[in-house]
Amino acid sequence: MYADARAGGGGRRLASKIGKGRRRSPVAATRKRRSRRRPVPVRGGAESPLRGEPAAYVPWTAPYVSVIVPVMNEKRTLARVLREASAVHPSTEVIVVANGSTDGSLKIARDSGARVLVFDRPLGHDVGRAIGAREAQGQILLFIDADMVIPASALRDFVQAVANGTDVALNDYSGPTRREAVHSVVLAKHALNALLERPDLEGASMTAVPHAVSRRALETIGPAALAVPPLAHTMAIHSKLAVRRVRHVDVGQLNPLRVKRERHNSLEPLIVGDHLEAIQWLVRQTDDRGGRDDGTRKRWMVR
């Protein structure tokens, strides 16, 4: 543009003569420029069979299943867990949420080929599930723990249930109830399902893995709710999503009570509190009685 200004009209006439009779369409010019490009490599490092022609474009496709695995110092079982997770479906992404790991778990996760989200400090109970779900691209999300090796053949049942129309596919695990003193977490799960008018679920809950959810369920309840599994469970049922028990996986045997942890930092109060938070949410959506009738009680008589 600067050269044209200095040349004045003569410059414009010269440009006109050079271009006269030789003007090409933009399409033709583009085609000629493209023909000079080097062969485009295709997947696997091979070149196009026609020299100078671009190879066929292979479009990226989203995974069908996303397996979310929160990890904090689980090097003993992690490699086996990730191997089973990756075999769940031919189109699977495995998302590892490594938080506060210092035992070499991070290297194992990276070497496995999983997609790894790294946090240098612990995120707290179940927050890794929510973060993994937020980043997941699959139509079906499967949640497992890094300290329990569950065969892919068992995990596939949860994926298949969602593929067949279930929104939340639960582990059919209700916890031990045939004993004199039932654990308060087990009681909380049964009580919450009774309040939700789903006694058929017994003690099955999104608190226990494995479980799977549909993309529709995730969009309905939101990823953040998954950080408090009983809350997510309550929101799913209240939203009339299809929630059902799918397969029994005895996580009580796979992950026996950690005596040392329970003595100094028990999860029991936290999980019971999660259930109370879920009940509080339910009351807010309905009324002070969670939608239950007060019968013929005349409370005003004693106020």
Image (cartoon, rainbow, N blue to C red):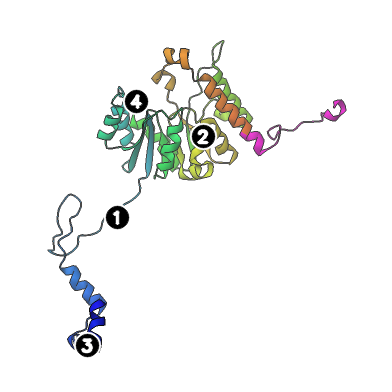
> In which quadrant is the N terminus drawn?
bottom left
- Quarter of the image for residue 280 reads top right
**Type of amino acid at the residue the image marks with label 2:** Arg
Residue that numbered label 2 is attached to:
244
What SS does tag 3 mark? helix
How far, Cα to Cα, is label 2 from label 4? 23 Å
Magenta residues span: 281-303
Residue that numbered label 3 is attached to:
16
How far, Cα to Cα, is label 3 from label 2? 77 Å
With 229 as the anchor, is 105 left or right in this view?
Answer: left
Q: Determine which of the numbered discs, if any, sits on residue 199 in the image.
A: none
How far, Cα to Cα, is label 3 from label 4? 76 Å
Badge 2 or badge 1: first in the primary sequence: 1
**Type of amino acid at the residue the image marks with label 1:** Pro
Residue that numbered label 1 is attached to:
59
Badge 2 or badge 4: first in the primary sequence: 4
What SS does tag 2 mark? strand
Marks 1 and 4 close (CB-CB < 8 Å): no
Q: Position of residue 2 (x, y in %)?
A: 25, 77
How far, Cα to Cα, is label 2 from label 1? 36 Å
Instruction: Characterize the magenta stretch by its predominant secondary structure.
Output: loop
Res 166 seen here: no
Residue that numbered label 4 is attached to:
149
What SS does tag 4 mark? loop
Q: Nearer the viewer, mark 2 or mark 1?
A: 1
User: Between residues 250 and 239, which one lies in front from this camera angle?
Assistant: 239
Tell me: residue 14, above or below residue 45: below
